[in-house]
Amino acid sequence: MSTFNLNGNFVTVSGEKNLLEYLRDTAWITSVKNGCGEGACGACMVLVDGKPTKACILTADRLEGKHVLTVEGLSDLEKEIYSWAFAAAGAVQCGFCIPGMVMSAKGLIDKNPHPTRSEVKQALKGNICRCTGYVKIEQAVLLAAKALKEKIELPETGMRQIKVGDRMPRVDARAKVLGTAEYVDDMYVEGMLHAAVLRSPSARALIKHIDTAAAQALSGVAAVITAADIPGCRYQGHIIPDWPAFIAEGECTRYIGDALAAVAALSKEVAQAAVKLIQVEYEVLPPLISPQSALAPDAPKLHPKGNVLAKTVLKRGAADQAIAASRYVVTQHYTTPATEHAFLEPESALAVPNRDGTLTVYTGTQNIYDDHRGIVSLLGVADDKVRVISKMVGGGFGGKEDLIAQHHAALLAWRIKKAVKLTLSRQESIYVHPKRHAMEMDFTTACDENGIITAMKAELIADTGAYASLGGPVLQRACTHAAGPYQIPNVDIVGIGVYTNNPPAGAFRGFGVTQSCFAMESNMNILAEKTGLSPWEIRFRNAIEPGKVLPNGQIADAGTAFKETLLAVRDVFDAHPGAGLACAMKNAGIGVGLPDIGRVKLKIEGGKVVMLTGAACIGQGLVTTMTQILCETTGLAASLVTAVTPDTFVTPDSGTTTASRQTVFTGEAVRQAGLKLKAALASAPLSALTGSEFDGEYLGVTDPMGSDKPNPVSHVAYGYASHVVLLDELGKVTKVVAAHDVGKAINPNGVEGQIEGGVVMGMGYALTENFLLQDGVPKVKFGTLGLLRVSAVPDIETIIVEKNRSELAYGAKGVGEITSIPIAPAIAGAYLRRDGKVRWKLPLEGTPYSRKK
C-alpha cells in the first residue's frame, strides 16, 4: 500500500494501482483525462511535488509521501485566473486537453512567475492539442502568469451586450478549464456494467466458429453477444448499409477493426478478460491492401457488388483538345496517405435502460440523429424507444460521424436491461474508426503563353477501405474542388473509390479536398516556374471573382473574395523570395441537391431564452456563435441566453456537424427564430413571454451532381484561402500567413482559433504524419503518429477577410475545414523554390522533419 497527499487529503492506495485509473475510477477526479494511456498526450497531467507528470505512467508505489495535485486542488484564485485567461485568449476548443495544459502551466508559473513564450512552449511540450494549434494556449498561459503576478482584477465576461463580430469568450470555457465539463467516460450510473469488444484476428479472415462459453462462464460477466443476438438490421452505414455491427460465423472480416463479439461485465478488467476467453476458429485470407490489388480482374469481391464503391465524373468543355493546343503543360503523379484523426477523446458510449422500456444512449457524436437512426435500426424498434443525448465531444474532425461504440453499448444494454458503458482504448480507436482517404492522383494542368489556364485533367483513385462510410461524398468533394478556385473552361476529372481490407476511410477535415488541393496547387507552382511567372501572379491572373464561372460550373457569388485573400498575402510573399504559396476553396453545406436543413427552437423559460438544436459542438464553439447571432438579432444581453445539450427527445434535427455547415445553417436558423422573438419583444417584455416558443429553419437549396443546368448551384457558399509559408535557413517552417475569406467573422477569436488549428493539422499532414499499415494492420500508436507538438509550431499570422454582405447568418461562411487544406502544397511550394525538387508524396520527403527509416 502507498499513502500520499491528493489535493490536500491523504489517501492510501494499493501500490500496483495505476494513478490515472485510481483518480478517475476511485477518487472520481475526472479533470484528469485518459487520452492515450501510453504517456504521449498529456491529457492526464498532474503535479507530483510540483512537477508536471503524466498520471497514466505512474503507479501508487512511486507516490509514497508525495503531494499529487489536480485542477480540483487549485486555489479559488487560481481557478478564477486560469478560467479567465484561457477563455479570454480563446484557448479552449473541444476542451479535453485543457486541464492537463493548466497543470503544465501551473508547474511552470510556480517556479517561474515571468515566463517567456519560448519557456511556455518548453513547459507544454508534454501536452498535445489537436484542435487549437497551441497559439492561443500559449497566450493563455502568459495571461495567467501576468494575472497571478499582478493580482489584477478580472473583468466580468458574458454579461454585456454581445454582437456579431465581438470576441465573446466561449460559453463552455470555464467548465472545460476546470474539468467539470462532462464527457461520456466521466459519467457513472449506479450498477453500471463495462463492455469490451472482440475484434478480427486479421484484416481478412474467414470466421468459421465463435465459442463464447468460457467467457460467459467467467464470474462477473453479465452477457456475451454476437451477430446472432442482433434483433434488427445488422448492417449499418450513412448512405450504403454495408458495415455489419458484428461479423457472423461463415463470413469474412473486412478489416482489423471488425467486431466479432461483445461482453458486458462488472468491471473493465473482467470484460477484457472475458474477451480473451472467446475462442474463434478462423482462416486467415490474403488481404487486399491497395486499390490496385482490389481492382485486379481476379480479386475476390469484398462486397456483393464488387470492389468499386463509387465513381465521380466532372467534365466541362474539351480538356484533351485544349491541353494539346496549350503552350505549357504540367503532368504529375501525387500520393497522399491515410491519416488518423487523433482527437484527444477516445470513443465512448453509455447506454441506460429506463423504467418505461426506452433506452437512453449518451455519446460524444457529430450528429445525435444519425446515431439514433442507426441504433433503432439495429435494435429493430420504433424511433421513440431510443433517446440519444450528446455529452461534451472531445474533438471529432469527421471521425465521430460513424457508429463505433454507441451501437455495441446499446445492444448490450437492450439485451440485459442494465446500464452499459463502452470506452475504447486509444489503440482500439486507432484500429476501428475511419481515417482520411489515401489517394493516388494524376493531374495535368495547362496554360497559354500568358499563364492563363486553359484546361486541367485529373484521375483520382481513393482507398475507401473496408466500408463505405462517407467515401462516396468524400470522392465527390475531392473531384468537384480538384481544379481549385480558378477560372478554367475545360476540365476532365474522374474519381474512383475502391474497397480494400484497410481500415475504412470516411470524413476528415477537408473532406477529400486536402488530397486534390495538394495535387492541383503543386501543379500550379510547377506551372509558374515553366511560365516564368511568380506563384502569386499566375494565381491572381486566373483567380475566380464574382460573376465568373467556377470549374464545376457554378457562378461565383457577390461575396466571393478569393482575390482579396491573395492581395492580403502579396506583400509578405514578395518580401521573401523563397516563400511558398497555395490557395484553396471549400464549400459550406452538404450541397449537391441533398437535403440540408438547419433548425433551432427558442423557448422562454425563467426570464431567459433557451436555445435548442440538435447541432453538435465538437470544439468549434457553435453555442457561442449561436448566442452572438441571437443577441445581434434581438438586442438581448448574453446573460439572458442559454442552451441545452443535443437530445433527440428535445432538440430539433439540425443535421450533422460536417461540411463546415453549422454556422451557416444553424446560425441562420437562429437568426430566423430571433427575428420572430424580436417581433414579440416589440409588444411585451421577455418576462411576459414565458412559455412561448419560436422556431427557426433554413433550407439550403442546391442542384444535384450531374445536373443538366449550364450553371448548377452545387453549394450555397464557398470560402477561399491563401496561405504563405516561410522557411528558415535550415528548411524548417518559421512562419505561416493564412488569409481566409470567411464572409463575416461572427467571433474573431473563434475564427482565428480554427485557422491556427487547421494550419498546424495541415502541417502535420504535410511533414510528419503517416498512418503506416502492414497487411491492413495499423503499425502506429498515438505517440508515433507524428502529431506536431507546440515546440514545432511556427509563428502563425491570421488574416480575416470579410466581404460578404448576405443576410444569411450575417454573411458568415464555414471555416472549419478549409483551414487545413492549402498548407501542405504551400510547404511543398516553399521547398520547390528552395531546391527545385518536386515533392509529389506526403508526408514530404527530404525535409528537416523527415523521419529516419
Image (tube, rainbow, N blue to C red):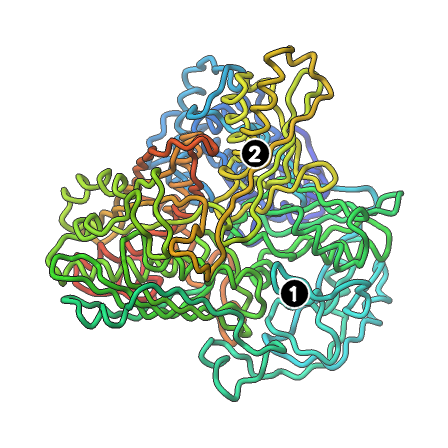
Mark identifier at residue 669: 2
Relative image position of residue 713 (x, y in whole percent):
43, 50
Q: Which residue is drawn at 67% across and 81% down?
A: 206
**Residue 594 appears left or right of 512:** right
Residue 330 position by quadrant = bottom left
Q: Please identify the residue farthest to the front as the structure is shown.
A: 709
Q: Which mark is nearer the camera, 2 or 1? A: 2
Question: Is 31 rendered above or below residue 590?
Answer: above
Relative image position of residue 322 (x, y in whole percent):
22, 68
Mark 2 or 1 closer to N-term?
Answer: 1
**Element on which disc 2 rests:** helix
**Residue 106 appears left or right of 647:** left
> Which quadrant is the C terminus positioned in?
bottom left
Q: Residue at x 84, y 72 (%)?
A: 213
Which amino acid, mark 1? Answer: Pro
Q: Please identify the residue farthest to the bottom as the structure is shown.
A: 298
**Residue 328 appears left or right of 584:** left
Q: Are marks 2 and 1 in contact (CB under 8 Å)?
A: no
Relative image position of residue 509 (x, y in whole percent):
46, 51
Residue 477 position by quadrant = bottom left
Q: Report whether residue 175 is seen.
A: yes
> Which quadrant is the N terminus positioned in?
top right
Work out whether residue 557 or residue 737 is closer to the camera in this orientation and state it: 557
Which amino acid, mark 2? Answer: Ala
Mark identifier at residue 241: 1
Work out whether residue 200 or residue 568 is closer to the camera in this orientation and state it: 568
Q: Which residue is drawn at 23% across and 58% down?
A: 524
